[in-house]
Amino acid sequence: MRQILSTTTQAPSIVIIQGVCENLCTLGTVEITVCSPEFINRVFAAPEAVAMAAQAASIKFQGLVDAWRNERGAMASITQAAMCPAYQSILGMGPDVVPLLLKQLKSEGDKPDHWFWALKAITGTDPVSNEDRGNLKRMAATWLEWGAQQGYGW
């Protein structure tokens, strides 16, 4: 996704699409603000484009889930499983993948998979209590509760 840059100088604000007008940033002293993808989607993207991007992300995520399960096989170590290329690609999807991870976790019901590493790495938080560690069902319930409190829809 392209980032939108807003520059401010003595003149009125200019919106620059990165990669198209990058050289304008070198003209004198400017203040640069990088807008979040959510802001860009709200302000600049047509609803159809946002829906198509979400669908594409969901398809990519499901493909990576399948690839990860094939790559890891019956690995006993979550550390090794999390180092698989497909799991690392899921991590690389960044914050946009959090609702997809939560949806996946919910769909797995009483047999949740190890999405906790990814959730913790991406969100920078870990809502699971020490007494619930190792209890995948309780860990999943805690993450789903956290996601609902944070306003994630899935």
Image: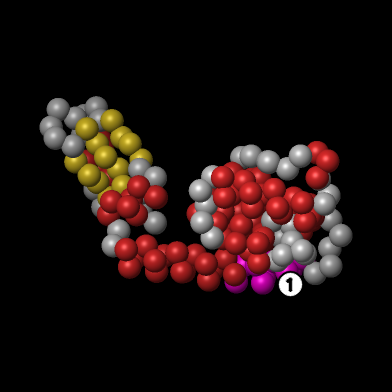
Task: State yes or no: residue 116 in magenta.
Answer: no
| Rendering coords of residue 28 (x, y %) | 21, 29
Farthest right residue? 76
Quick one: SS at disc 1? Answer: helix
Q: Nearer the viewer, residue 116 or 105?
A: 105
- Residue 115 visible here: yes
* Image mark count: 1
Q: Residue at x 62, y 46 (%)?
A: 146
| Rendering coords of residue 29 (x, y %) | 24, 27
Farthest left residue? 11
Question: What amino acid is at disc 1?
Answer: Asn
Q: Residue at x 31, y 35 (%)?
A: 32
- Asked if residue 14 lies left or right of residue 17, the reply is left
Q: Nearer the viewer, residue 12 or 48?
A: 48
Judge whether 94 appears above or below 75 on screen.
above
- Residue 94 visible here: no
| Rendering coords of residue 66 (x, y %) | 67, 72
Q: Residue at x 27, y 54 (%)?
A: 44
For the N terminus, give its image quadrant: bottom left
Q: Nearer the viewer, residue 57 or 24?
A: 57
SS assignment for the magenta stretch, majority: helix
- Asked if residue 86 lies left or right of residue 10, the reply is right
- Asked if residue 56 lies left or right of residue 79, the reply is left
| Rendering coords of residue 142 (x, y %) | 69, 48
When asked about the image quadrant of residue 26, the answer is: top left
Q: Residue at x 13, y 32 (%)?
A: 11
- Asked if residue 36 lies left or right of residue 64, the reply is left
Q: Residues within 10 Å of mark 1 (few under 14, many from 20)?
A: few
Task: Tell me the residue that label 1 is attached to.
Answer: 70
**Which residues fall within the magenta stretch?**
63-72
When asked about the image quadrant of residue 103, the answer is: bottom right
Look at the image and name its color scheme: secondary structure
